[in-house]
Image (cartoon, rainbow, N blue to C red):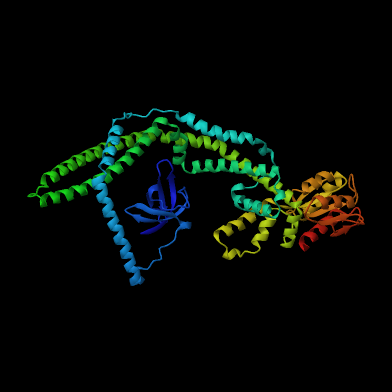
């Protein structure tokens, strides 16, 4: 029966795992039944398989599964003949091969027997001693985690954060798309930031995987460090391998014995009887040896598995407890640093993109307007999508846009020549509408540096600032900040301004008048 499910767990050391179906039924599987050559088994992979007696066979990743479309009822007579011919040839080949093995490969059986005999002579421990105690193994793992955090502790001082796990896929899509438009924007600095972000992402992914699957953490952090445990497990795997070979030989020899018995019965009165009798005795001896070795190997395997099981049980609960305690100490630091890295990477990427003529031309041609950032780029993409008919992946992008809209706030930037004026205008604007996000500056240079990293919807300034006039300020603003905000100017209109003036107010206009002008700009855009 063909069934679908998802890999709940996979142990790359012994090749065994568990698949959980949609009905929450847990199915065991072994890597020997993995029939997908494109993807190797990993935890969380959707798969299609044949279910027989609570075991999975012929497993493939769902994305690579091709249903069998052959309709046997519609097979042409000529095709049936061809198929039957091929089947007959295969059967004849198998018969010949079996006869060859039965009568000409005794040397390989003897070699296998000698190999198993030597293997059984090897001494096996009756218990497992720790190579590394529990606390040391856990400490070693979290030392690596802490080293990665400490190397990047400067990121904790970064003001912004970008939820990397939420934005990761689209962030790297954006990176690749911008690279295709203009490879020159990928400076050594941006490349280094990106590579380090990937390294930290891998550390975090491994950390989260271990938290989600404690059994996996136990195997990789503790059991993988135990030399005696690993040696016994390796021995158990070799035991199974040899046992499987002996079972094949036992089956083969058993079949040949039946043939010899029949020949002996048919040739009692012939000269060949003694020769056939000797051959049968020899086969019987070999058969008994094989069966005896199989029993010994089976006993050895059960003994080894019991040792492994007892060792695993002895430390498992203590490991889970200690690992969980240590994990909680580092989880928030990992997320904080990763999100800060994502924020810096995103800012630097778009900062270079804004200065690229190729990028600006591309977005202009695509009718992308507004501040060039990930949110604007995502908005442009989603404008071509119908949210009601969107796929699950596209629906995630709509949620991502809501998140980016929340963190990429649009501001009303107020730049004045005195602290009194800037505070007065800010209070008036906030009183007019408490939902407005305002940012105030007296220092023109700091105002432009801030605007380069944020989205300014309305710019409020007066004719004469501290160091320069409004005309010069707007020229510098236009040169360094890609987006063009609406401008509310208090004073005389500049003669040659780079940014159009949306509202021109009289010199010394009250905060109420300025607030009204700002509201008009916001509502009319």
In the picture, the quarter occupied by the N terminus is bottom left
Residue drawn at x 60%, y 63% is 387
Q: Nearer the viewer, residue 512 or 351?
A: 351
Q: Nearer the viewer, residue 148 or 192?
A: 192
Q: Quadrant of residue 311?
A: top left
Q: Is residue 308 above or below residue 94?
A: above
Residue 100 placement (x, y as % from top left): 26, 49
Residue 296 placement (x, y as % from top left): 25, 36
Q: Quadrant of residue 158?
A: top right
Q: Is residue 361 above or below residue 438?
A: below
Q: Quadrant of residue 234?
A: top left
In the picture, the quarter occupied by the C terminus is bottom right
Q: Nearer the viewer, residue 153 or 408?
A: 153
Residue drawn at x 29%, y 38% is 112
Inspect this view and state whether residue 57 appears. Answer: yes
Side of 65 where 429 appears, left or right: right
Side of 44 where 95 appears, left or right: left
Q: Nearer the viewer, residue 416 or 178?
A: 178
Q: Name the outermost residue toward the left.
A: 269
Residue drawn at x 45%, y 28% is 133
Residue 46 placement (x, y as % from top left): 46, 54
Q: How many marks?
A: 0
Residue 21 placement (x, y as % from top left): 41, 54
Inspect this view and state whether residue 30 appears. Answer: no
């Amino acid at each position: 029966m063909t069934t679908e499910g998802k890999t709940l767990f996979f142990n790359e050391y012994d090749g065994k795992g568990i698949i959980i179906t949609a009905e929450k039924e847990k199915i065991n599987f072994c890597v020997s039944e993995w029939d997908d050559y494109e993807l190797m088994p990993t935890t969380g992979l959707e798969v299609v398989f044949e279910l027989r007696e609570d075991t999975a066979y012929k497993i493939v990743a769902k994305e690579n599964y091709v249903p069998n479309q052959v309709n046997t009822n519609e097979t042409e007579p000529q095709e049936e003949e061809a198929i039957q011919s091929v089947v007959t040839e295969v059967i004849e080949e198998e018969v010949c091969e079996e006869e060859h093995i039965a009568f000409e490969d005794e040397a390989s059986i003897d070699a296998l027997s000698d190999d198993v005999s030597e293997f059984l002579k090897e001494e096996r421990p009756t218990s497992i001693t720790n190579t590394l105690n529990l606390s040391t193994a856990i400490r070693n793992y979290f030392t690596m985690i802490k080293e990665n955090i400490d190397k990047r502790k400067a990121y904790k001082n970064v003001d912004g954060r970008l939820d990397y796990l939420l934005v990761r896929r689209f962030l790297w899509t954006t990176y690749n798309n911008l690279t295709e438009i203009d490879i020159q924007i990928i400076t050594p600095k941006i490349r280094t930031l990106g590579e380090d972000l990937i390294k930290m992402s891998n550390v975090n992914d491994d950390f989260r995987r271990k938290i989600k699957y404690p059994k996996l953490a136990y195997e990789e952090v503790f059991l993988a460090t135990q030399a005696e445990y690993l040696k016994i497990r390796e021995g158990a795997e070799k035991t199974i391998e040899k046992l499987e070979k002996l079972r094949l030989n036992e089956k083969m020899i058993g079949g040949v014995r039946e043939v010899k018995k029949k020949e002996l019965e048919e040739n009692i009165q012939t000269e060949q009887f003694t020769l056939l009798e000797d051959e049968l005795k020899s086969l019987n001896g070999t058969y008994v040896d094989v069966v005896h070795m199989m029993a010994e190997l089976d006993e050895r395997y059960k003994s080894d598995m019991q040792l492994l099981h007892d060792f695993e049980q002895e430390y498992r609960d203590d490991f889970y407890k200690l690992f969980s305690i240590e994990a909680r100490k580092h989880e928030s630091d990992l997320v904080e640093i990763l999100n800060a890295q994502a924020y810096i990477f995103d800012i630097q990427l778009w900062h270079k993109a804004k200065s690229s003529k190729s990028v600006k031309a591309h977005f202009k041609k695509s009718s992308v307007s507004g501040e060039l950032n990930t949110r604007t780029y995502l908005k442009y993409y989603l404008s071509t999508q119908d949210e009601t008919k969107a796929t699950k992946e596209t629906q995630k992008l709509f949620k991502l846009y809501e998140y980016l809209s929340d963190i990429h706030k649009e501001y009303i930037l107020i730049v004045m020549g005195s602290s009194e004026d800037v505070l007065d205008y800010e209070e008036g604007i906030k009183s007019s509408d408490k939902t407005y996000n305002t940012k105030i500056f007296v220092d023109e240079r700091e105002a432009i540096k801030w605007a380069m990293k944020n989205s300014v919807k309305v710019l409020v300034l007066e004719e004469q600032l501290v160091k320069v006039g409004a005309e010069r300020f707007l020229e510098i603003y236009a040169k360094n900040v890609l987006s063009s905000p609406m401008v509310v100017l208090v004073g005389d209109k500049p003669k040659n301004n780079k940014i159009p003036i949306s509202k021109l107010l009289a010199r010394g206009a009250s905060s109420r008048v300025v607030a009204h002008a700002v509201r008009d700009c916001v509502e009319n855009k």
